[in-house]
Image (spheres, coloured by chain):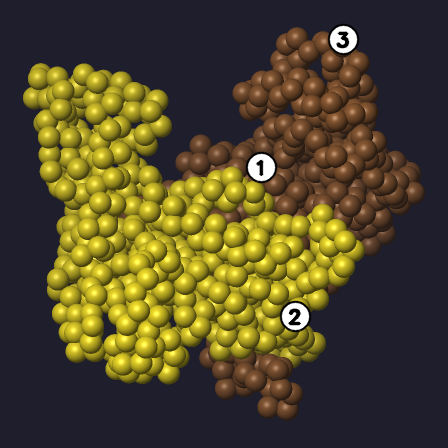
Chain colours: A yellow, B brown
């Protein structure tokens, strides 16, 4: 199998686009801006879902499902949220087609089937969910409401890219309601931490935890917590957000509760989400010019075994010897594929599984059988080792854990060496242009300066990191006083 | 907790509607015809999904995801399918809202953001999927394509009922492509059998397997296989369908493959689906006037333990003794809830868990502690037994299996005694009006007779059963020759 992928050095963006398609993760569909997630890509997404779902349930959340459509009047109830999403809403106006009287076999929208009120295809579900919560919350005993939904949402984007920015995408959205401000803030922070643990622990992608500036905040939130990751081209990617909504949605949808003392109060809300965008982050963090590199926790196939043989008898013997290895690995919950296709040569298979990012490849030929060994190759480092067949299953198990740790370590080192403190705007621009990554700089705290820097450099404030030493200074652009550094970067 | 549900005898339809809401399964939303699936209902759906997904994967299928929207021209490519669904399609015509210049804070659809081509919200995904398969299939080596999707679909229904008929519903849809007619037919039948195994084995609902008449066939299919269940009111419910599509979609979307001999041929297709409608079938098959009755395989909580106590010290002692039981049950993968709420009395708790259909309730008070016993109550029979605490976990495990089997047995007996053979139209009408259920009758095979019977009695042909003795006769309505009996019923 020939890979023919553009290299990262040639054109990082093209490399990404080609890799996503060639590795069978996703492709563009016949519907503008909407993607098809192919089985191999979807299998990775399913692993993400399963782990996140487990983490949500462990932290007390339950799944539910709310309507795809939001009536316009409901959508506009929380004004800031509505305004923030209005420009990218797909709108359903009719509910029937009919035969085109002029062209047999063709259909037209039936003008007699116009909806009385237009329906918005959810770009996010705060409106529909808070309109429902009104019926679910009467007393403090009904709180907290800790609910998550797995769903598709639509945001009409003009320029789309597979996984990173698509008109329709899959995500989960948590929506919680609490009796006190403190509890809602705690929930927002907790879910940011759940996301960080998942992205670091399972996706092997290091993140910076922080809060968004007012400009970058979710429309309708009082505070947006985020986790920011860094891609190999030095651009940042927002990997997940968790919003403290204050009482904004409670007020917009009149969701009140009786306190233990019998007083009526508005509830406090949060919402939080991650999406199929994480698939893009996964590809761009670990993969290389040979194809995907998948962390073992998320690889649909963790180990592939390729037989090397010249005759049918050799294949039979190899199959027999491999069989017990396959069983031993499966016993350890390792996903193994024995690639015994007779239609393809080993070289083709090696290239294919490299392209698809299978973490460990085991090759076995007649010589290995004689010597009681296997050839074990790591996808991440592209290195090979001869390993004795005795106890090899434990070796593989350890190796998978090692690969998971090494991928994180490598990405962490890259990230850490790509946070650069600057003290003036020339340095700021130079670092951004030459080295990329996060630029840690003082900022005067105004939206005007933030916008000016964006206009001049395309860099935005990714976050105010939560975990940094307090340090006063002066704004890198205006020289005005700054209460602390923030992280700027060009971003996806 | 007071239940106050209408009884089945009073008004079966009302009983169903009230029960679905009171047992916290689902409720109507602020969006016409769309439901909110509440956490308890969604937890049951998740169990169904998990088991079906396992069965699909075990039979070689992979999951993928295709767009929510279908451009109109793509939608109309397969004419029969398009015509079949045109009258119930939600149509997206615009992609942006803007501020209403006349009413501050309100939004209107931006007339400058009209789509060049309208997008249909998928009522089913054959069109979008077959347009994709064109790019995936070149040679016989690419076949079979065995793909499933979990998704939401929209069919604009005028009269809706929770789970049974909603504008938006959740489902899975399998879409497969094969090199030969025989293989595609085999796949359609296989998936009908998978559905039957699931519905009978997991949902404890007996089904009749059969094929649909041309009138009732899926638009665009050559044959529709189905499983039909019978509800407690004697009405039938179509629980799942599997369609042999012939080459209809392959021709409409030009999906050809090169055979091993190098000839170009159209591929053969199938599609098959079950939906959240199954939740309705679940409720209507097993539940009673006290509330839900859930088969243990699908119950989010299989065992609830309710402490009976007069003092705090008693509660502490009970907790200690219950703790080891909880652990022992969990070890057997039994889902247990220890309901130690101090805000509710035991009577309230009993009623609540009965309403929610928890299969087994264990009550434990100071006397039980003294005697080393527990009081075990079955939800399905509402009977109680005193059981020694020694080895009770095995007793419970066996009991759950027994309940699962008994629920199926009871439903099977009801179903079997509600298939009535009739030999003339008077009998036909009488059975339908008095006893209900399936009426097994001869039919002349014409759509005209089928329609006439429907007009006269509201009964439709549910299926031509696959598993029945060959018997010739004369049509119950027209007296014309009939090649065999079919099953009529009023249906949901």
Number of residues whose C-alpha sits closer than 10 Å to that of mark 2, classed few (under 14), some (14–19) or many (20 or more): some
Separation of marks 2 and 1 at Cα, in angstroms: 35 Å
Say which chain tag 2 marks.
A
The answer to whether dots 3 and 1 both sit on one chain is yes
The residue that disc 3 covers is B371
Q: As rendered, which of B60 and A448 lies closer to the eye? A: A448
The residue that disc 2 covers is A252
Separation of marks 3 and 1 at Cα, in angstroms: 37 Å
Q: Quadrant of residue B327?
A: top right
Say which chain tag 3 marks.
B
Position of residue A23 measured from the top left corner of the image (x, y, whole percent): 26, 51
Q: As rendered, which of A196 and B428 lies closer to the eye? A: A196
The residue that disc 1 covers is B47
The residue positioned 75% from the left and 34% from the top of the image is: B342
User: Looking at the image, do the residues carrying marks 3 and 1 touch, with CB atoms under 8 Å apart?
Assistant: no
Q: Quadrant of residue A491?
A: bottom left
The residue positioned 70% from the left and 31% from the top of the image is: B339
């Amino acid at each position: 199998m020939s890979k023919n992928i553009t290299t990262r050095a040639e054109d990082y963006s093209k490399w990404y686009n080609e890799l996503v398609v060639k590795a069978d993760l996703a492709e563009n569909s016949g519907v503008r801006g909407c993607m098809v997630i192919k089985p191999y890509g979807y299998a990775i997404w399913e692993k993400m879902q399963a782990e996140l779902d487990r983490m949500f349930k462990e932290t007390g959340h339950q799944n539910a499902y709310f309507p795809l459509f939001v009536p316009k009047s409901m959508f506009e109830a929380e004004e800031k949220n509505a305004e923030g999403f209005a420009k990218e809403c797909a709108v359903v106006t009719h509910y029937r087609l009919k035969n085109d009287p002029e062209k047999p076999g063709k259909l037209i929208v039936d003008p007699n089937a116009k909806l009385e009120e237009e329906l918005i295809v959810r770009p996010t579900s705060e409106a529909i969910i808070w309109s429902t919560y009104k019926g679910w919350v009467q007393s403090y005993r009904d709180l907290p409401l800790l609910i998550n939904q797995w769903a598709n949402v639509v945001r009409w984007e003009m320029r789309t890219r597979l996984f990173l920015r698509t008109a329709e995408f899959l995500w989960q959205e948590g929506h919680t309601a609490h009796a006190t401000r403190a509890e809602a803030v705690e929930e927002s922070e907790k879910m940011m931490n759940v996301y960080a643990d998942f992205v670091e622990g399972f996706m092997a992608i290091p993140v910076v935890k922080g809060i968004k500036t007012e400009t970058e905040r979710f429309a309708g939130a009082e505070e947006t917590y985020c986790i920011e990751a860094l891609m190999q081209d030095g651009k940042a990617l927002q990997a997940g957000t968790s919003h403290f909504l204050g009482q904004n949605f409670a007020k917009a949808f009149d969701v009140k509760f009786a306190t233990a003392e019998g007083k009526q109060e508005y509830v406090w809300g949060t919402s939080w989400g991650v999406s199929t965008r994480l698939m893009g982050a996964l590809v761009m963090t670990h993969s290389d010019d040979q194809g995907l590199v998948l962390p073992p926790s998320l690889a649909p196939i963790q180990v592939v075994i390729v037989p090397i043989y010249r005759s049918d008898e050799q294949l039979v013997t190899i199959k027999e010897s491999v069989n017990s290895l396959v069983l031993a690995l499966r016993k350890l919950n390792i996903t193994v594929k024995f690639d015994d296709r007779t239609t393809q040569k080993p070289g083709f298979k090696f290239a294919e599984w490299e392209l698809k990012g299978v973490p460990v490849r085991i090759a076995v030929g007649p010589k290995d059988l004689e010597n009681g060994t296997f050839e074990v190759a790591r996808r991440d480092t592209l290195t090979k080792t001869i390993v004795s067949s005795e106890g090899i299953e434990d070796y593989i198990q350890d190796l998978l854990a090692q690969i998971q740790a090494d991928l994180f370590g490598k990405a962490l080192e890259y990230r850490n060496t790509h946070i650069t403190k600057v003290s003036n705007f020339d340095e700021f621009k130079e670092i951004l242009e030459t080295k990329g990554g996060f630029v840690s700089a003082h900022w005067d705290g105004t939206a005007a300066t933030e916008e000016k820097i964006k206009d001049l450099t395309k860099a935005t404030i990714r976050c105010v990191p939560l975990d940094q030493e307090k340090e006063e200074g002066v704004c890198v652009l205006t020289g005005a006083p700054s209460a602390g550094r923030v992280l700027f970067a060009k971003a996806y």
